[in-house]
Amino acid sequence: MTIFIPTPLRPFAGGLDAVEVTATTIAAALDGLTQAHPDLRKHLFTAEGNLRAFVNLYLNEEDVRYLPAKEATPVTATDTLSIIPSIAGGI
Amino acid sequence: MATSTEPIALPELTTDDLSRYSRHLILPEVGMEGQQKLKAARVLCVGTGGLGSPLALYLAAAGIGTLGLVDFDVVDASNLQRQIIHSTKDIGRKKLDSAEDKLLALNPALNVVKHDTMLSSANALEIIREYDIVADGTDNFPTRYLVNDACVILGKPNAYGSIFRFEGQASVFATEDGPCYRCLYPEPPPPGLVPSCAEGGVLGILPGLVGVIQATEVIKLILGKGSPLIGRLLLVDALSMRFRELKLRKNPECPVCGDNPTVTELIDYEHFCGIVPETKEDKSMKNGIPQLSVKELKQRIDAGEDVFILDVREPYEYQIAQIGGKLIPQNDVPQRLADIPRDREIVVQCRSGARSQRIAEFLKQSGYPKVVNLAGGILAWADEIDPKVQKY
């Protein structure tokens, strides 16, 4: 599946705007992503391993928080996962 | 507005209005009544910068009757790459005055209301209450949450936009049935984790793209036409020129707009965003890091002291201006501690003093015994010590 990396996190993913991973669930996909790019881990997860509250994850166009199985939701090769961080710029 | 709360009597269009807005009047979606709704509308633009410039200009051109502007800043040369409402001759003027001139030149019938202040918990409800719709074009998390909460409390829709580098986001928050900013982002990121445009840069055209999307949503909300961005987050990537859309849901547990709200009045948003207020007496110390003024640094250099300055900016910034520091970009510092002596005092320096403060805190945590932050960074150096140092 494809994981879209937002601008603020690209420096921690080798400058890539998208990363391809092979995984069966959202959690496994994130695992694959942070194994390939370990610097991303602290930006996405707390020290306890939970997803940070200000990081939003979308499977295709759905918020993972509202999926019944949340991060255990199965994924296929054609799905996309988007990481949507807060940005505040405007001036 | 879209539903039943229209003013009882809409203002008449003058002969001038009929010719000025003729291209609107022949659109079935606007027409005479729509143009009258625009004339009756009161819209508040929070910020007259990158997003606020195109927003205010297009809203003024479209025939919005009353446009409120909130800003306390003055025009700086570095604004002009994107803040197209201001001109070179306006450098040093209040942004409000500069914006008012341009807006009235474009549309003399416009009623401009200037709010020369920083929006705060003390004044936000009072200011926003006077308007029908808010367009948020600010640049920091505390104000984003403040504008959101005030809009939810007062029931005013918020045409939202934000930008970073080549990426933008837009949505419409705080409508009666739609989600709010807190439904999307329940918690702000800790300070320092998400760089601002001043630190990370922004493509000058991007606020134009996103601000015009906000203006479009404002107009649609007033007309009650089309499908507004309610419950949808539009993502704009200018580099790949891709627009994507995500679904937003109203969070029933949202502390502001949920079923049992716990935030029913405005709070301390700086504190909410983890920003520790600077008190006057501890200006010389911030989060345990002594703050060195540029004047003190100059005195020490002039006195012949061999000061170790660690410049944590990026190489392209170093090319623009530097004050003799050793360049190690902030993200490289953790891997290059061997290049930073532990037996000397380290003066950490960046552009404005923000990044260097974080790196100073990091070095202190890494066991460096004497670390100070150059307050105000190279900007303060250019202002107070050497005007030949290029500001950017």
Image (tube, rainbow, N blue to C red):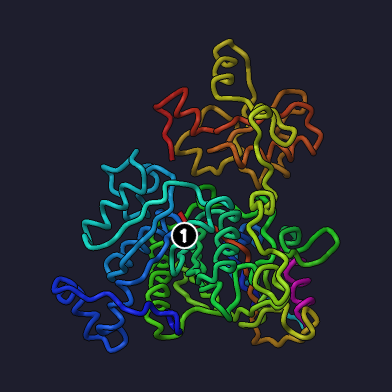
Is residue A83 among the parts visible in the rendering? no
Q: Residues within 10 Å of mark 1 (few under 14, many from 20)?
A: many
Residue at 65 percent of width and 60 percent of height: B265
The image shows residue A90 at horizontal and vertical percentages of 48, 57
Is residue B336 among the parts visible in the rendering? yes
Q: Nearer the viewer, residue B181 or B163?
A: B181
Task: State which quadrant residue B61 falls in.
Answer: bottom left
Report the residue marked by disc 1: B137
- Find the magenta span and give its range: A25-37
The image shows residue B144 at horizontal and vertical percentages of 56, 59
Determine whether, in the image, residue B78 is placed left or right of residue B365.
left
What chain does badge 1 belong to?
B
Q: Nearer the viewer, residue B300 or B324?
A: B300
- Give the amino acid at mark 1: Gly
Q: Is residue B354 magenta?
A: no
The relative height of residue B114 versus residue B262 in the rendered view (above or below) is above
Q: Quadrant of the N terminus of chain B?
A: bottom left
Determine whether, in the image, residue B135 is placed left or right of residue B372.
left
Magenta span: chief secondary structure = helix
Task: State which quadrant residue B299 falls in.
Answer: top right
The relative height of residue B292 versus residue B89 in the rendered view (above or below) is above
The image shows residue B276 at horizontal and vertical percentages of 69, 43
Residue at 65 percent of width and 72 percent of height: B257
